[in-house]
Image (spheres, rainbow, N blue to C red):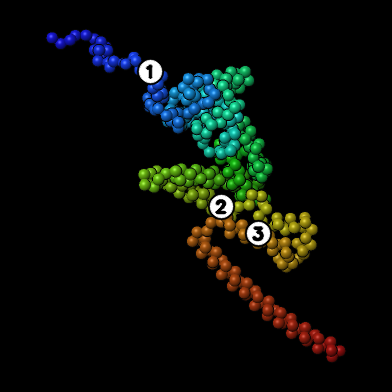
């Protein structure tokens, strides 16, 4: 007759016997991920190590979740809440790490791109974070009655460390526009947006609020194009051709939108590379030369064109255009046609002036002969 008994009893009978004479301490330590079950003997590079965190003291400082699971958790939270700092905070709460907002802000200050958990762990192992856990962060935050800086406060804190030139550009934009047009934008985009927007400003832009709004839209579109380019750079043409085609289609749509806005509002999208408002114009350069007491800049138009300061200004302007402009075939054809027309017109003026000069010389000679006779 078959042996009767519970399933558990059968499993216990079939379970292999453990040799109790083996010294367990002599066996290699097995590190197991409590989420995915991965087992390794060497945890280096496979598990994050928090040197001084007492929670992992008996595990040689290594976390109970492998690096893959922690990275995946962080990425999932970042997408879910669309907030990188909040995702890092929740990730730290899950694994018991100390959350340092100042460390996070320093990382963003150094590189505004998306942070990596591994880089945060390296900074977490520094001496100032010794023996700190998530409980320490939580207690400290409750005592201060503040959990996280909001986006505006965070941006302000980081922007205070911008270069003087970047701060000046931001100040100029806000003065011209009348408000911060990029207030809710990520910090990684704000510096780019301010530096791009200021290139389109001239002396009259503040008086045309509609045109100003269209310029801001163009700058926003360019920023989105920049993000598409960054995404495309991470894809492989062999395996991600569909995604690349989709992104290029989105880029093309934005480029067409920019061209339409620029044509309808007479906005020069190209050749605006000077970061100083209005300082790329010849008018401003002449004004600047007058302030420096260049006498020739106050002379008549002929002397202005031939003055050392004006020629220097024209040369600098041309160099800036050649360095920063992007001309397609149609642009080059237009430039050649305009150049040809200008050459013809200038040659016509030269011929007329030469003829006028010849006639004046004849009159001078006649007057000289008359004077001699008298």
Q: At which x and y percent is residue 51?
A: 53, 26
User: Mark 3 or mark 1, which has the lower sequence index?
Assistant: 1
The reply to whether discs 3 and 1 touch (Cβ–Cβ < 8 Å) is no
Quickly name the residue at label 2: 269
Task: Answer left or right for 46 relative to 278.
Answer: left
Quickly name the residue at label 3: 316
User: Mark 3 or mark 2, which has the lower sequence index?
Assistant: 2
Seen at 61% across and 49% down, the residue is: 199
Which label lies toward us, 2 or 1?
Answer: 1
Residue 7 figure quarter: top left
Seen at 60% across and 52% down, the residue is: 273
Q: Quadrant of the N terminus?
A: top left
Question: Circle 3 sits in a helix, a strand or a loop, which is it?
Answer: helix
Instruction: Report the number of numbered marks.
Output: 3
Q: Residue furthest left?
A: 1
Q: In front: 209, or 343?
A: 343
């Amino acid at each position: 007759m078959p042996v009767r008994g519970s399933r558990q009893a059968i499993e216990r009978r079939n379970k292999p016997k453990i040799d109790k004479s083996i010294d367990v301490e002599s066996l290699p330590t097995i590190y197991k991920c409590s989420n995915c079950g991965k087992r390794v003997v060497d945890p280096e590079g496979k598990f994050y190590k928090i040197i001084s965190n007492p929670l992992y003291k008996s595990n040689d400082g290594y976390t109970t979740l492998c690096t893959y699971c922690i990275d995946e958790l962080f990425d999932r939270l970042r997408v879910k809440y669309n907030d990188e700092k909040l995702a890092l905070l929740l990730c730290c709460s899950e694994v018991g790490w100390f959350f340092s907002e100042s460390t996070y802000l320093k990382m963003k200050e150094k590189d505004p791109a998306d942070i990596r958990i591994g880089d945060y762990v390296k900074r977490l192992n520094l001496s100032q974070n010794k023996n700190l856990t998530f409980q320490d962060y939580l207690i400290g935050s409750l005592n201060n009655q503040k959990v996280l800086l909001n986006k505006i406060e965070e941006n302000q804190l980081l922007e205070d460390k911008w270069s003087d030139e970047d701060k000046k550009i931001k100040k100029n934009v806000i003065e011209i526009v009348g408000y911060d047009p990029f207030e809710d934008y990520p910090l990684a985009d704000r510096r780019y947006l301010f530096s791009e927007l200021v290139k389109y400003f001239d002396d009259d832009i503040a008086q045309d609020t509609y045109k100003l709004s269209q310029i801001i839209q163009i700058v926003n579109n360019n920023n989105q194009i920049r993000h598409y380019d960054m995404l495309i750079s991470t894809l492989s043409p062999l395996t991600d051709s569909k995604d690349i085609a989709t992104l290029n289609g989105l880029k093309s749509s934005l480029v067409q939108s920019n061209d339409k806005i620029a044509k309808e509002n007479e906005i020069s999208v190209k050749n605006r590379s000077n970061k100083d408002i209005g300082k790329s114009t010849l008018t401003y350069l002449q004004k600047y030369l007058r302030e420096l007491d260049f006498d020739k800049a106050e002379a008549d138009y002929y002397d202005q064109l031939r003055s050392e300061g004006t020629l220097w200004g024209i040369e600098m302007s041309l160099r800036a255009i050649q360095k920063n402009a992007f001309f397609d075939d149609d642009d080059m054809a237009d430039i050649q046609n305009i150049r040809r027309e200008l050459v013809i017109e200038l040659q016509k003026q030269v011929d007329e002036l030469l003829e006028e000069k010849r006639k004046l010389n004849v009159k001078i000679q006649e007057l000289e002969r008359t004077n001699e006779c008298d």
